[in-house]
Each structure stands twice: as C-alpha cells, then as structure tokens.
Image (cartoon, rainbow, N blue to C red):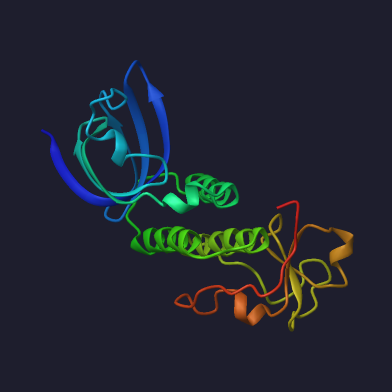
Amino acid sequence: MFTHHRTQAIILDDKQVGEADRIFTFYTKDFGKITATGRSIRKGKSKLKMNTQLFSFSEIEFIQGRKNNTLTDAVLLSSFRKTKNNLAKLSLFYRIAETTLSFIKEQEKDEKIFNLLLETLQEVEEKNLSKEKLKIMWCAYTFRLLYFLGYKLYTKECMICEEKIEAECYFNPEGKGVVCPKCYPKNPTGIYIDDIKKVFLTNPNRCIKITKSYINNI
C-alpha cells in the first residue's frame, strides 16, 4: 500500500541516477530528512525539473513506498535566485547543507530545525553580507543546530586550565567547549567570542549573536 504526502521542503542534495532520474535529499517540515526519486525528471518536458533545483524551497508531494519514496509534484516557493548568483553566498549554502546532512542521519520530524534552516537561507538571500559575516552565520547556524540535536556545549570553564570563563573566550570545535585567551595560543583552533553570555544558548529561544570573530581551521 502506498501513501501520498505533501509538505514544505528544502532541497539539500541531488544525484543523477540512470538516464533521466534524480534522487533528492530534502529536509521537510513534517517528516524531517527524507530522500525521494524524481522519475524521468531530467527529460526536457518534465514539469518537476524547474521546481526542484538544488537549495530550492518548495512544496512537494511524494508517494511513500515500502523501500523508496517517489516525488510526484513540486511547487516552487523560493529559488533563492540572488544567492545562486553570488559565489560567496552559494558557498555558504553548500556548507550549511553539508553540515545539516552530516549531523542528521535519520528521518525524524523537527520543526525547529526546519525553521532554523529556512530562516538562515532567507537571511542570506535578503541581506548584503560580507564574507566575514557569512562565515559567522555558518558558525551561528552550526551552534543552533547542535543545540537542537541535544549537543550542549560546555562553556563554564576553560577546557585546558579549568578556570571560570567570565567573558572573552574561544569556541574550540574539536573539544566542543571553550578556551580562555591565555590558553588559546597552546592550541590555536577556534572562533573568538567577545561575550559568551550573548552567544551560547542559555536561552534556546534566543538567536545566537556573534559580534566578533576570526576563524582558524574550522
């Protein structure tokens, strides 16, 4: 028995299969991460072709089979056209997609993650952002995604000297915690944060704000 579903979705990846098919990886509002096959979608007359470009935001319909999903309809809601004409912004979209797909392994609905993803892409599309700010946005997105997935970052003490963190520090992605300015030169990998209380997720409803940063090896 096959079931039809309709939901909003963001296309995070696509791959060519056979002569004309394409397999899409979506993050959806109602089903989380799913894959679906677009049959004969690469043919010139396919009605789905223009509405299923990479990183598009669409309302999709798919048939849930026993083993695979089949895409049957797509209505384009946003193509993020300006971003796709900007190499720096497009590069950020690829990094966001790669980060999301790396952390999220299974189909599981999480509307908070869907909203975070959509709002981040919309902000990148609408704002005039420098390369520095685009890097900061990727870091902020990653922090929020980790929080929603249950990875709480240790921010009370320096990972190396174990002294209490008062304000300035560095987020160290390797150790999933923070390092004080005195210890940072011993392992210079991280993002500089000038006010930890404004950045680190003490309130899950508050957006991350990183006011100063530089990025080494991240």
Q: Is residue 202 above or below residue 213?
A: below
Q: Which residue: 61% across, 67% down? A: 153
Determine the image quadrant of residue 113: bottom left
Using residue 11 as the reference point, say whether residue 3 is left or right of it. left
Q: Left or right: where does residue 14 sit relative to residue 88? A: left
Left or right for 163, reference 83: right
Q: Quadrant of residue 198?
A: bottom right
Horizontal and vertical percent position of residue 207: 50, 74
Foreground pick, 164 / 11: 11
Image height of 43 relative to 110, above or below: above
Q: Is residue 31 left or right of residue 94?
A: left
Q: Which residue, as the protein is rendered here, is positioned at the far top?
A: 19
Where residue 187 sits in the image (x, y, percent)? 84, 58
Assign the N terminus to one quadrant of the image: top left
The residue lying furthest to the left in this view is: 1
Q: Nearer the viewer, residue 32 or 136?
A: 136
Where residue 204 appears, x then y in whole percent?
A: 47, 75
Residue at x 32%, y 20% (from the top left corner): 20
Residue 209 drawn above or below residue 3: below
Q: Residue at x 64, y 62 (%)?
A: 130
**Vertical side of 25 occupied by 111: above or below:** below
Which residue is at 71% across, 58% downward? 175
